[in-house]
């Protein structure tokens, strides 16, 4: 499967972007493959500056032996790494099947929003909504 601008727009985080903006985001992304069992992100890892969008396969997000979430195609993790410097990763993310992901580094994201600030504003608004929803879930 290959992710195009229309496919990226179907991902909630990117749904507010125009086709041109989505194409700009895709231009900064690198496609990476991870074999089943590969630990993509390690809890406590510092300097982890990547955002991951699962294109194919499934991942498990965990701390210790506790599974926090499972993500599949169109879902993402590591979004805080785009915004915050040197924040340790809060969980392990392990490929439970072979995974293909789009990876955007903090540096590439920041370069993109310097030239396309509307993209940054739209993505930060969606991240704020996601944080609000998480806060509401925790409060319940």
Image (cartoon, grey):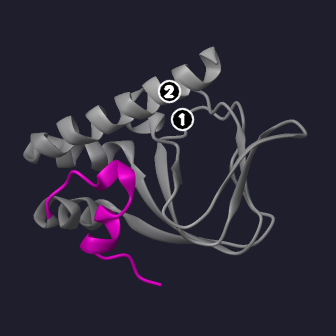
Position of residue 47 in the picture relative to residue 71 (left or right): left
Q: From this viewpoint, which residue is outermost toward the top?
A: 139
Position of residue 68 in the picture relative to residue 18 (left or right): right
Disc 1, SS: loop
| Placement of 50 over or under 21, stated as above or below | above
Q: From this viewpoint, which residue is outermost toward the right?
A: 65
Q: Residue 140 location in percent, x, y? A: 64, 18
User: Which residue sits at x=70%, y=36%?
Assistant: 91
Q: Which sits in the foreground, 105 or 58?
A: 58
Position of residue 123 in the picture relative to residue 49 (left or right): left
Q: Which residue is mark 1?
A: 47
The answer to whether residue 9 is magenta is yes
Q: Residue 130 location in percent, x, y? A: 44, 34
Marks 2/1 in contact by CB < 8 Å: the verdict is yes
Q: Residue 94 location in percent, x, y? A: 74, 55
Q: Residue 60 location in percent, x, y? A: 74, 53
| Placement of 13 over or under 130, stated as above or below | below
- Judge the density around disc 2: few (<14), some (14-19), many (≥20) Cα neighbours within 10 Å: few
User: Which residue sits at x=11%, y=40%?
Assistant: 117
Q: Which residue is mark 2?
A: 86
What stretch of residues is rendered in magenta? 1-18
Whole-angstrom CA distance, mark 2 to mark 1, is 5 Å
User: Which residue sits at x=48%, y=47%?
Assistant: 50
The picture quadrant where one finds residue 8 is: bottom left
The picture quadrant where one finds residue 103 is: bottom left
């Amino acid at each position: 499967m290959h992710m195009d601008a229309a496919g990226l727009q179907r991902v909630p985080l990117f749904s507010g972007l125009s086709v041109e903006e989505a194409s700009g985001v895709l231009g900064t992304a690198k496609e990476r493959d991870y074999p089943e069992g590969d630990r993509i992100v390690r809890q406590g890892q510092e300097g982890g500056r990547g955002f991951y969008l699962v294109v194919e396969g499934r991942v498990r997000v965990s701390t210790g032996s506790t599974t926090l979430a499972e993500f599949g195609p169109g879902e993402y993790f590591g979004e805080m790494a785009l915004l915050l410097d040197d924040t340790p990763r809060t969980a392990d993310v392990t490929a439970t099947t072979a995974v293909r992901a789009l990876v955007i580094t903090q540096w590439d994201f920041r370069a993109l929003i310097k030239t396309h600030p509307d993209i940054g504003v739209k993505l930060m608004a969606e991240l704020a909504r996601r944080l609000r929803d998480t806060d509401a879930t925790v409060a319940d």
